[in-house]
Image: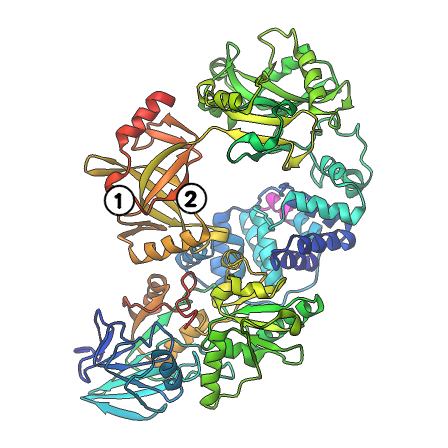
Amino acid sequence: MGKGVLTFTDRGIYCPAGDFYIDPWRPVDRAVITHAHADHARPGHARYLATPGTAPVMRHRLGEIALETQAYGETRTIGDAHVSFHPAGHVPGSAQVRVEVGGEVWVVSGDYKTEADGLSEPFEPVRAHAFITECTFGLPVFRWRSEAALAAEINRWWASARADGRPAMLGAYALGKAQRLLTMLDGTIGPILTHGAIENTNAVLRASGLALPDTIRVTPETKAKDHSGALVLATPSALGSTWAGRFPRASKAFASGWMAVRGIRRRRAADKGFVISDHADWAGLNAAIAATGAERVFVTHGYTAQFRRWLEAEGYDAEIVETEFDGEALDSPAEDET
Amino acid sequence: MKDFAALFAALDGTTRTNAKVAALAGYFETAPEADRLWTIALLSGRRPKRTVTATRLREWAAEAAGLPLWLFEESYAVVGDLAETIALVLPESDGGADRSLAAWIGDIRALSALEEPARRDWVVAAWESLATDERFVFNKLLTGGFRMGVSRKLMTRALAQATGIDEAELAHRLMGDWSPETTSYEALVLAPDPSADLSKPYPFALAYQLDGVPDDLGDPGGWAAEWKWDGIRGQLILRGGVHHLWSRGEELITDRFPEFLRARDFLPDGTVIDGEVLAMKGGAPLPFNALQKRIGRKTVPKKLLAEAPAAMLAYDLLEAGGEDLRDAPYRDRRARLEGLLAGLPPDAPVGLSEAVPFVTWTDLAALRATSRARLAEGLMLKRLGSPYRGGRRKGDWWKWKVDPFSIDAVMIYAQAGHGRRANLFTDFTFAVRDGENFVPFTKAYSGLTDAEFREITAWVRKNTLERYGPVRAVPPVHVFEIHFEGIQASPRHKSGVALRFPRMARWRRDKPVAEVDTLGHLRDMLATYG
């Protein structure tokens, strides 16, 4: 197999042939970014490369940065490496990074989801010799339901809270999950209110052309009684904070892949947990890996030890790579307030 | 079972007590009577006997899901609940025809008569015929450990709502030695015949812990104090010429303590006493570990009977001459108890737990400080005018325990918890210093806040030195103040000691590892209090 197209360093995933890093966690000269979540798009790099869909949120979060964009499917040559982005289906603009050096192809998945959510560009399998994949939900207990079934479940809960005369408060990450939920909500039930962190992200995405339903920003002046029957979209940490106190008697729910596990659901002390993730479930991971045709698989974050062992048994040459990616944060939501 | 699975989902889907009670009351109004009875049984800890081992269930579920067993086990470790893990890994199903809860339980009970391959076939076919949400409930029935996030108290309240029967009266009706095979909904709940079950105990009165000092309780003249003995809280019942001994966990333990057969020689029929079962010699209690040897034993060898003879120290009189005294004030019940027990010979199996006389709260505080030397856990405070009310309530009864033992120790291993703590490191092993080494001496898994557990979990994930199955070795960095209630010698443990009720009192972020306590310190405690 020769020398790797990509190597793993303490700064992040590195391409020697092109002298660039993918989603590095320490400051570097040139960073290729898969998506705008805080554990992948970090501050302090000299130059950034990302998709046009990722760029606005990165600018919003990271401020003045030297950022170039490159559309899905276009190839750019950096040194001796040919680099292209391909949809990862994780959040709007999210990408897998394909790197080809001397005819050998490696693909970095970033974070990904295989089922289309009607908002993010749908995941596109890319043939590769080696695939570097996340496995946040790399155990067979994680199995997602269809988008339509989830939407029906959420709207039922909202309507029932409204019937009880209570606000419905739903916790979700500000980038990606929140907007995906917005597209699932049935606006005929009532008004949709949003936490400031979510509304800021909405504004950026709307400005870049994404169609989202109308929302009302929650401000210090917002009064629950002025918005009867509302659904309040909050960040996960706001759900348990004094911020949530302005909506007394709210029925609280949390949207995350972790809600598949009852113990974790009960720990959140929310009334309800919706099993919704922007990461691939067990079947999705396995299907995605098979579709790459790769023989070598590197697993980066999630249930790495278990998933590697499974892949080995399935005949792959699988290795664990230690990274500083969080996946879908469970107990320390890094994505929360950004 | 679809309505039962829906009930479970409703209970699970809310944290509000009123919503839970409403869901349960609705079920009690509409479900078939046999299903109601089983639901009452399950929610009061009366489970059908296990007819399939957990090991077999794991194997069958892994096979049915097409997974290697190790991967099933890894999944179980993350989910923290066997019934749920099975339900999550099986291929999806819409389910088949609906059968009642009682019918399913009947089939599960009948499994014990089948050979293993037939059991397997039946269980796998059952999985295929059930919808995903029903499977979880079904697996809970198979595995026994049924908890629905509803206390017995809430269940009783819901049943009271559904039937219009007084809640305290219902609590009493649901006590004792019954199962859905031996009774009916009619006979248990609606129209019980008091003479049908003479062994039926009264609901135990329980107390909250008094934090701080009792000065807020008002005039000490309105209160009585008793020693809080360290044994098994029990209810001794003499009715119909027979005696019964119940533990507070509502287990009938008559046969384990043959000493109480003689109670019939000393006490009249129609007597019910609330007291503490202790190992006693010469009128004085022995340390708890003497009684501990008796607890697990269904039959007691002669030698042990001689070594650790059991007796009851009586706290309260609930029934005399067949009359229910629970509504009488404590003052009167206590006087009748003292009259009943006065003049009994010292070798009688029941004696009076002497009142602790005091005038001021300060006097009482001084007496409480002597608890440990008397082998008591502290004091009980009871309002003289209070009736005997079942369950844990604030106001009339308080336990005022001695301060626990305390030691500063360092965490060296961590393990993930189960159930609500799945995927969170909550079970820790602690060590004390012995020269240059750290010697593990206890485990503890309670006492921290959820936020602290989350913080520790993130730290453990990043600082694992080595994995031994589910256990992770971590660097000795974090110091905790460990509280415990007792210490005894234990040759099985490396440290030579075993603790009672160890828990984490505080995370001592201010303490460096160099300042944790030593093995010598533990040994001194053992020498003084063991």
The answer for how far apart the CA atoms under marks 2 and 1 are is: 21 Å
Rendering quarter of residue A229: bottom right
**Mark 1 burial class by Cα count in 10 Å: few <14, some 14-19, many 20+:** few
Q: x, y percentage for residue A139? A: 42, 64
**Magenta highlight range:** B108-115
- State yes or no: residue B186 in magenta: no
Vertical relation: A322 (above or below) B229? below
Quadrant where the image shows the N terminus of chain A: bottom left
Q: Residue at x 40, y 36 (%)?
A: B483
Q: Circle 1 sits on which residue?
A: B512
Q: In this view, does A87 lie to the left or right of A190?
A: left
Q: Nearer the viewer, residue B74 or B53?
A: B74
Callout 2 and callout 1 share a chain: yes
Q: Which chain carries label 2?
A: B
Amino acid type of the residue tagged 2 in the rendering: Tyr
Mark 2 element type: loop
Q: Which of marks 2 and 1 is nearer the N terminus?
A: 2
Between disc 2 and disc 1, the foreground one is: 1
The image position of residue B502, as x and y in percent, is 41, 36
Image spot of residue B308 (x, y percent): 49, 17
Which label belongs to residue B445? 2
In the image: residue B358, left or right of residue B478: right
Q: Is residue B455 shown to the viewer in this render?
A: yes
The image quadrant that residue A186 belongs to is bottom right
In the image, what residue type sits under mark 1?
Answer: Pro
